Amino acid sequence: MLRQYELVEKVKSYDPDADEALINRAYVFSMKAHGNQTRASGDPYYSHPIEVAGILTDLHLDDETIATAILHDTIEDTLATPEEIRKHFGQNVARLVDGVTKLSKIEAQSESQRAAENLRKFLLAMSDDIRVLLVKLADRLHNMRTLHFIKNEEKRRRIARETMDIYAPLAERIGMYEFMTEMQTLAFRELEPDAYESITKRLAQLNKGGGDDLIQRIGRGIKAHLEANGVEAEVTGREKHPYSIWRKMAERHVSFEQLSDVMAFRAIVDSVEDCYRTLGLIHQRWPMVPGRFKDFISTPKRNGYRSIHTTIIHDEQMRIEIQIRTREMHAQAEHGLAAHWAYKEGAPTATGDHPWISDLVEILEHAATAEELLEHTRMAMYTDRIFAFTPKGELIQLPKGATPIDFAYAVHTDLGDQTVGAKINGRVMPLRTLLDNGDQVEILTSKAQHPQPAWLSYVVTGKARAKIRRWVKSKEREETVSLGRKIFDEIVQRLPTPLGWEAITEGLRRLKLPNDEALMEAIATKRVDDVAVMEALMPGSATEGTKPPPQRTAISIKGLTPGVAFQLAECCHPIPGDRIVGLRREGEGIEVHTIGCDTLASGVDADWVDLAWGNETDGGTARLAVVVKNEPGALAAVAGILGRHGANIVSMDQTARDGSFHTFHFDIEVHDLQHLMGILAALRAVEMVSTAERL
Ligand code: MN
């Protein structure tokens, strides 16, 4: 156990300004308060808080945190009161001790409430002051180190399970890998004693194979190779931790012997440039294993972790993992957030791109007080995310601004796809509700449901967005293909002779399209026009013009000199029922416009001819602009209405799309104006159609 003066000296060694008297007072207070209580190990109880404080000095934490660690069990387990703590140690320490005490109380709650309730409050308390969490993690680590003294096996297993499920992941979340690893190793030993035993034994055998220490031999080889090429590096090797080996065996369903990379090496170099040089030198010397290379220097992990990871096949035909990093990255990787405390006196140098780290550097340089620093640290780390729970108490991490849809997709893709509603904390709430920290979310589902494009306007996670988009895309394609098929059928009608299956295969080849669906898509999107399709299916058919488009034959116009060529204007697409006017230019035929057409209004230099539709007339092509909501089925609904009203779609174009609405232009064949008006009215009645107009 650490003695009082040793503890004070440790703190002084990294923080000469630390309040020595505060630590001394805490030491004495805790010792007196715990009196002759003992631990399961038989040691005096107060050795525990002192050891917890010792763990935190390794992380170079400030005097208030150290005092809090020493006092952390006094309120809960002794007669000491919060008032006494406040009187002797000040407001800050009292608040921190209170925070840790609250966490301990939750720990002691009944089994059934544990997972969800516990963790939720835990996180809320954590966001109050990060130091509370650091003390709690150190407390748990020390309890794990002394776990084997507890006689009751069930209790040991419960504590180990909780450590594995809650505390180790929390340590990982704030980048404290050293804590995480040790907690996992200790918990693993308790939960899977046989597996732990067997793996550690095999690791020992492996390492001792060949007389010389294999790990050291490989490490020396790597170091020598780097030095021969001018890079100074500190190379250390280790077996992977028993728990991570075991997890890999379980995940990949392989035995220890089949598991090829159980050794990991670390090269610590002076600069970022040297990291990349080291990587190059290692890959030149040994073959890399594809798919295992990761560059967390250019793209740091969320918690700020930076390193380059690669796996190579070493001389002894063994796969080994190598991590390459600078000294500073190393300190940060081992101690995470806590590493920054070590830099409290002098500002740290290059810290990479990770936003909260660079924010932190900024603050370290400018913060007036430790309080300000803490406040900013907490904000930088936690304001960008929220924690919500499934009904079973499973924790789901989401970015701020997430909705129940994001939550559902984070749990499972099927759950997201089938979401119809959500209960938040037991109450049914709209799907666009923003989730709050600690919310319990129950997703209501229906097998008949499918992703809704409208969700895109309020989801924030990449996963949800990607899944919804993919569904909408496939649906859109389906609709395009079926629309193309309708147009295709009309084209086929215009061919001089019926079409054989062979002709379609040949046609696809001529158009260089892979299959039937691609053809329908190309037709619908106008990438190939009718003439090209006809020619491809039956060469010569379009130019022979055996069956010209129906509207040509069916139109007759009164007021024209017989034999004079005329054409319906492309600008206004007159249809029977429209009042029409002809424009006659020198040497050209007559162009037929509607009376309201802008071409007439612009005063073209041409003669006007009064025209009227002939009795035999049947049909014309009208152009429509239809704005539909961005929802699957919208296009199908439009096509369905056109079909039911007997209007052939001649062509279709998508002219505009934004998040919520798509605009389509349709050229459709209609009998007359009345027919068209009926169609427009029917389109406007569709819920998914926003507007439908004739152009
Ligand atoms: Mn404790």
Image: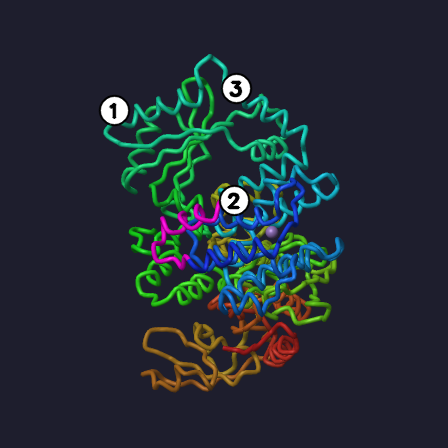
For residue 179, the mark is 2
Stretch of the chain drawn in magenta: 1-20
Earlier sequence position, callout 1 versus callout 2 = 2
Which amino acid, by three-letter code, is at mark 1?
Ala
Q: Which residue is mark 3?
A: 206
Q: Quadrant of residue 327?
A: top left
Q: Give the SS element for disc 1.
A: helix
User: In terms of depth relative to the viewer, which is nearer, 171 or 325?
Assistant: 171
Q: What sort of colour scheme is used for the picture?
A: rainbow
Asked whether residue 489 is in view, the answer is no
The mark nearer the N terminus, 1 or 3, is 3
Q: Is residue 7 magenta?
A: yes
Q: Secondary structure at mark 3?
A: helix
Residue 531 higher or lower than 503, as above or below: below
Q: Is residue 299 visible?
A: yes
Q: Distance of mark 3 from mark 2, alpha carbons?
A: 26 Å
Instruction: Give 159 or 381, whichever is nearer the viewer.
Output: 159
Question: Which label number is shown at residue 228?
Answer: 1
How many marks on residues?
A: 3
Q: In terms of secondary structure, what is the magenta stretch mainly?
A: helix
Q: Is mark 2 within 8 Å of ligand 1?
A: no
The image position of residue 566, as x and y in percent, is 44, 73
Q: List x then y, in percent, for residue 540.
A: 48, 48
Q: Amino acid at mark 2?
A: Phe
Q: Which residue sits at x=62%, y=50%? A: 166
Measured as percent of width and height from the top left, residue 354 is found at: 39, 54
Give how far apart the Cα atoms at labels 1 and 2 are.
Answer: 36 Å
